[in-house]
Structures are given as C-alpha cells and as structure tokens.
Image: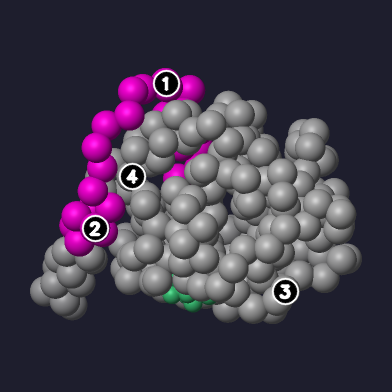
Amino acid sequence: MTFIPSTHPRAKSLYIRERLVLAFDKGLVAKEGLMAHGRGEAFDYLIGERTSEAARKAIRAAAMMLMAAQRPVISVNGNIAGLCPKEMVELAFVSGAKIEINLFYGTRKRRQEIAKVLKKNGAKEILGIKKKDAAKLSGLDSARRVVDKNGIFAADVVVVPLEDGDRTLALKRAGKKVITFDLNPLSRTAQTADITIVDNVVRAIGELIKECKKNRPVKKFDNKKNLASTILEIKSNLTRRARLA
Ligand code: ATP
C-alpha cells in the first residue's frame, strides 16, 4: 500500500483506491471497473475532492424521490460492492428499496462474491441472482439487458451508481426514474438521469442516508441546471488553480 500520512488532503482518495484494488483482488471488481474508477478519480480531482453545494442539492432531491417511490431498487455493481456495501444495505433499509446485483461484466462467480459481501453487511434479500426471475430490458445487447422481474423490471425509481450510459438510457426508455452517483457531470449517464449526484459515492452515500431519514416532502429539482452549475464550479476551480500556478 502507498504510504501517505492520514492527514494529507489526498489520503482519503488513495484509501478509496486501495479499497477498490482489494475488491479487485477478491474478485468483486472487473478490470474495466478499475478503469472506470480512474476516470472517477480524475473528475474528483477537478471538483476538489469535496461535496459541492450542487451535489448537496441533488442528494436532497434524491432522498425525496427515493422516499416517495412505490417500488425503489438499488442496483449494485462490483465497484459499489467493493467501495460501500454496508452503506448500500443501510440505504435500502431506510428507504425500503430492494437491492439488485446488476453487472456490466458479469460472471456467476462475481455475482456470488458480491452477494456474499452484501449479505455479510446485513442484506436479507438480494435480487438479480436467480435465473428463473430474469426479465429483459429492451434496447440493450443480450447480457446487459437482463434484470430481475421483481426488481429493476418492476421498479419505478432505480438508483444506479457508477453506471454506463446505454443502461441508463434503457432504464429511462422503460419509464423508470433514475438517480445516479457520477463524478463526471458530462457522462451520458449524468446527462440522462433524473437526478445526478456529482460526487464520490463514498463521500455522498452517508449524506443520502441522513437525508432519507428526514423524509421531507418532494420539491422540484432541475437536473440540467444543477449539472450546469457543477460544470461552472469545475471551471472556476481550474481558473483559480491556474492563477495560483
Ligand atoms: P457514460 O457511458 O455514461 O458516458 P462512461 O462510459 O464513463 O459513461 P463507465 O465507464 O461505466 O461509463 O463509468 C462509470 C462512471 O462512474 C464514470 O463516469 C466515472 O466518472 C464514475 N465514477 C467512477 N468512480 C466513481 C465514484 N467512486 N463515485 C462516483 N462516480 C464514480
């Protein structure tokens, strides 16, 4: 492990990286997941490795949407299982959401490893495992369109952290409301979702759980406007740093 004092401003993101590498070694995360994480790290650097005011707004809106949902589902992939399994189980508990394992690069073995980690962290029911419950989302290639008929297929609101754009588009076409965590405000997922939390999922998930517990009434939220203010904030961070250089 890279040695860096815990008081160093970059310590947290290096710690997160090490967690992902450990999860890769345990077979939870795919190689492609490491690359997606790298892309996330680059954007985290640009947003200043902190939760912005725009992200807080999106977290509040996401909590309201989740608590008002009839059939909410949290989609868990390898990166999420490696980074914050306990928090995902807690989010499911406080919001009444189901948990579904949904993998871009899925093998039976990886699915089982992820289920094991979720169970160890308190998950009682995990969807996306039984073949007999498979249903298909239209508009996607064969492996990725499979979802659970009692989970994402029937959901009204789906939380898809660290998702790729094709699946987000397919979920939208299927009439779902989509909440995502995505550090890249320009990704297709970020631009397609109903609510995009532009923050590191590890930093933001605790805030989302807290907000769900407040159970506030739903208010209007403009995702495009919120994303635009995030992009402006990145621009002003860069300008400030360029002046200091
Ligand atoms: P799209 O298809 O939506 O345009 P993409 O091709 O970048 O995006 P992926 O490769 O699946 O999609 O990447 C997943 C996304 O997750 C990336 O945008 C990355 O910035 C983001 N990401 C990675 N790690 C984290 C993290 N810890 N917290 C939040 N977002 C993250």
Numbered badge on residue 58: 4
Residue behind mark 2: 224
Query: What percent of the width, then of the height, locates residue 143?
Result: 72, 74
Residue behind mark 1: 214
- Compared across the picture, whether 27 is left or right of 39 comes to right
Q: Which residues are magenta?
A: 203-229
Is the CB–ligand 1 distance for label 2 below 8 Å? no
Which residue type does callout 3 highlight?
A: Ala
Residue found at x 18% / y 69%: 235
Give the number of the mark in front: 3 or 4. 3
Q: Does the residue at mark 4 contact the one at mark 2 (Cβ under 8 Å)?
A: no
Which residue type does callout 4 highlight?
A: Ala
Residue found at x 48% / y 51%: 176
Q: Does the residue at mark 4 contact the one at mark 1 (Cβ under 8 Å)?
A: no
Q: Residues within 10 Å of mark 3 (few under 14, many from 20)?
A: few
Q: Residues within 10 Å of mark 1 (few under 14, many from 20)?
A: few
Q: Secondary structure at mark 3?
A: helix
Residue behind mark 3: 143
Is the CB–ligand 1 distance for label 3 below 8 Å? no
Give the number of the mark in front: 3 or 1. 3
The residue closer to the viewer here, 108 or 46, is 108
Mark 4 or mark 1, which has the lower sequence index? 4
Mark 4 or mark 2, which has the lower sequence index? 4
Is the CB–ligand 1 distance for label 1 below 8 Å? no
Looking at the image, residue 138 lies above or below residue 196:
below
Q: Secondary structure at mark 2?
A: helix
Residue found at x 34% / y 65%: 191
Residue 110 can be seen, yes or no: yes
Which residue type does callout 1 highlight?
A: Lys
- Compared across the picture, whether 22 is left or right of 20 comes to right
Mark 3 or mark 1, which has the lower sequence index? 3
> Is 225 a magenta residue?
yes
